[in-house]
Image: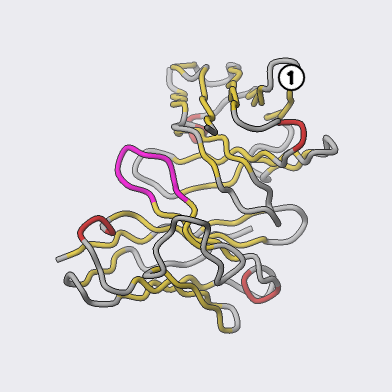
């Protein structure tokens, strides 16, 4: 099972919006609505911020939103804040009880 | 409060074995899906294995036949037995609550570092 494809980096100024893409295949992202996004700050474990493509866990600001079109999922961070600077990972169910992750995107708040 | 604490990491020679523990408080391990995820130094996340509440286990191809997941219900602890370790298994190993399909990985530990080197 190949990793999902994410851009290695993304950036935006405070208050702006940024979108991170996550591209897979019809065997993972395109085949299931089980896409999640995780935020990871240096030295910390990942934190769930989006699940089932568009849903936010309790406590996650509504500045974070998710979507999917075909084999590509996207995470949009609106109203960028300094604390949003982190690594972001997508994941998708990949069939046969496998979970597949993206390679990660480093988000820089300029 | 939910806590997952991984222990058991360390330096091990290629071909050796190591067992990681994930001690859980705040929920019952045996009633939940539990997942192991690893992260090689400076790299992204890689799914390793999942154990469902019914005890069924599944593994990534890269560790199948070498890694084994188990649970101790009396200790509310998850384990990852790692045998025939290779240099490419060097990583920070996280345990998390959740499965490959659903639910998502909503609680994570801080990770245990495994270094495979001679």
Asked if residue B63 is positioned above or below residue A101 in the image, the reply reads above
Q: Which residues are magenta?
A: A40-47
Say which of B106 and B16 sits in front: B106
Q: Is residue A31 magenta?
A: no
Q: Quadrant of residue A76?
A: bottom left
- Residue A107 position, x and y percent, is 28, 62
Q: Name the element at disc 1.
A: strand
Asked if residue A40 is positioned above or below residue B76 in the image, the reply reads below
Secondary structure mostly seen in magenta is loop
Q: Residue furthest bottom?
A: A69
Q: Is residue B69 left or right of residue B118?
A: right
Question: Which residue is at 56% across, 83% downward?
Answer: A69
Question: Which residue is at 60% across, 26% downward?
Answer: B24
Q: Which quarter of the figure is the N terminus of chain A placed in?
A: bottom right
Q: Is residue A73 left or right of residue A25?
A: left
Q: Is residue B56 left or right of residue B91?
A: right
Q: Quadrant of residue B118?
A: top left
- Residue A2 position, x and y percent, is 58, 60
> How would you rate the neighbour count of disc 1 (Cα within 10 Å): few for under 14, some for 14-19, many for 20 or more?
few
Q: Chain of mark 1?
A: B
Say which of B16 and B103 sits in front: B103
Q: Which quarter of the figure is the C terminus of chain A placed in?
A: bottom left
- Residue A51 position, x and y percent, is 57, 62
**Which residue is label 1 attached to?**
B72
- Residue B17 position, x and y percent, is 60, 17
């Amino acid at each position: 099972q190949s990793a999902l494809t994410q851009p290695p980096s993304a950036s935006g100024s405070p208050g702006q919006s940024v979108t991170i893409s996550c591209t897979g295949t019809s065997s993972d992202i395109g085949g299931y609505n089980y896409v999640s996004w995780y935020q990871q700050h240096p030295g910390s474990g990942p934190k769930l911020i989006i699940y089932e493509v568009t849903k936010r866990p309790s406590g996650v600001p509504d500045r974070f939103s998710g979507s999917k079109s075909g084999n590509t999922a996207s995470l949009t961070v609106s109203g960028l804040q300094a604390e949003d600077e982190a690594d972001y990972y997508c994941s998708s169910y990949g069939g046969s009880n496998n979970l597949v992750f993206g390679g990660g995107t480093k988000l820089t708040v300029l | 409060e939910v806590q997952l604490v991984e222990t058991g990491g360390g330096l091990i020679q290629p071909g050796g074995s190591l067992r990681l523990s994930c001690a859980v408080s705040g929920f019952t391990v045996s009633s939940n899906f539990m997942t192991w995820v690893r992260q090689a130094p400076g790299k992204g996340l890689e799914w390793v294995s999942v154990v469902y509440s019914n005890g069924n286990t599944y593994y990534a191809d890269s560790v199948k036949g070498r890694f084994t997941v188990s649970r101790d219900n009396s200790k509310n602890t998850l384990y990852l037995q790692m045998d025939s370790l290779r240099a490419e298994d060097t990583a920070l190993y996280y345990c998390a609550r959740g499965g490959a399909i659903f639910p998502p990985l909503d609680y994570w530990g801080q990770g245990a570092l495994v270094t495979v080197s001679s």
